[in-house]
Amino acid sequence: MKYLMSDSDSKPGSTPDTNRDNSDDHRNITGPSGQNRSRDRVLALAGLVQAVSLIDAASRSGLVSQDTLESSVNSIFVQNPDTALDVYGGSAGIRKGLMVLRELLSNFEVARHGRILQYAIAVMGLERKISAMPAVLRQLGAEIASIDEQRMLRHDETGILDELAIQQLASLYESLISEIQPRIQINGNRQQLQDRGNIQRIRALLLAAIRSCVLWRQLGGTKWQLAFGRRAMSKSVNLLL
């Protein structure tokens, strides 16, 4: 998976070059403009928020929008995007994430948003751990490419996200990532957390959340922007919506 790279790599889909100057790391995938870079970081953050909000809904009620689920999970397979929007299949694919992010930035309520924020922070920490594990990155990339190839063969290159692909992604998360410490703990309704199909959706969505964290970091996203850039991010979210 080319977008799961170390900090020395600069953009989704690029091939690492150990001989190049690293001064241009984290270039914006849509161009040099600071405005584009800021917008794309917001899209990546919305992708993370969308995935974890779906995880929260699945863990509590088992009910998630199929279209939004597909947009988030399909982002795992997008390796060479021209723009950040391409990762999520266009603006419609990331709308839920943008709406929830707007609420988090402007009207945060612990009861409504606390677990979403908790999950987002936990996934960011997990992604940083994974980024320092080259062997895990290589295996993760190879396995995701294989799952993608298989689903394309099953559906004549249409890229339909079927239950088998979700099962395979869930198994990949379980075998390769779930034991990395500290483990992400998902809370919710016991019945939903015992349903095998629902657990598979949650694990696939955790991979989607990690994918958005990778994009955020490659676009130059930092914890300081999260802490002090809320006004600018809110403006970008409103423009995108």
Image (spheres, grey):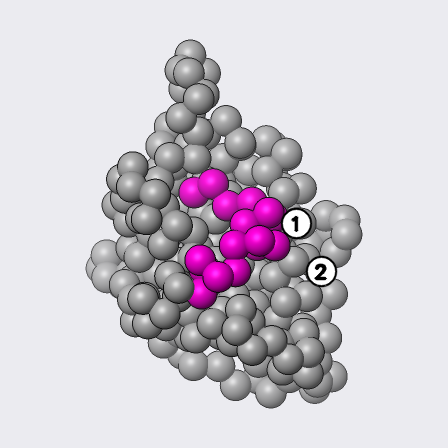
Say which of 205 and 168 sits in front. Answer: 205
Quarter of the view holding residue 23: top left
Say which of 202 and 16 sits in front. Answer: 16
- The segment highlighted magenta reads 219-234
Report which residue position mark 1 lands on: 126
Report which residue position mark 2 lands on: 184
Locate residue 225, reporting x and y percent: 54, 50
The residue positioned 67% from the left and 73% from the top of the image is 115
Is residue 170 shown above or below 3?
below
Q: Identify the mark at residue 38; answer none if there is no mark.
A: none
- Give amino acid for label 1: Leu
Locate residue 26, reporting x and y percent: 43, 35
The residue positioned 59% from the left and 47% from the top of the image is 224
The residue positioned 60% from the left and 76% from the top of the image is 108
150 relative position to 170: left or right: left
Q: Are marks 1 and 2 in contact (CB under 8 Å)?
A: yes
Is 211 colored magenta in this rendering? no
Say which of 98 and 15 sits in front. Answer: 98
Locate residue 4, reporting x and y percent: 49, 40
Is residue 21 shown above or below 117?
above
Quarter of the view holding residue 76: bottom left
Whether residue 230 can be seen here: yes
- Give amino acid for label 2: Ile
| Main secondary-structure element of the magenta-colored stretch | helix
Disc on the earlier residue, 1 or 2: 1
Is residue 36 shown above or below 111?
above
The residue positioned 39% from the left and 50% from the top of the image is 38
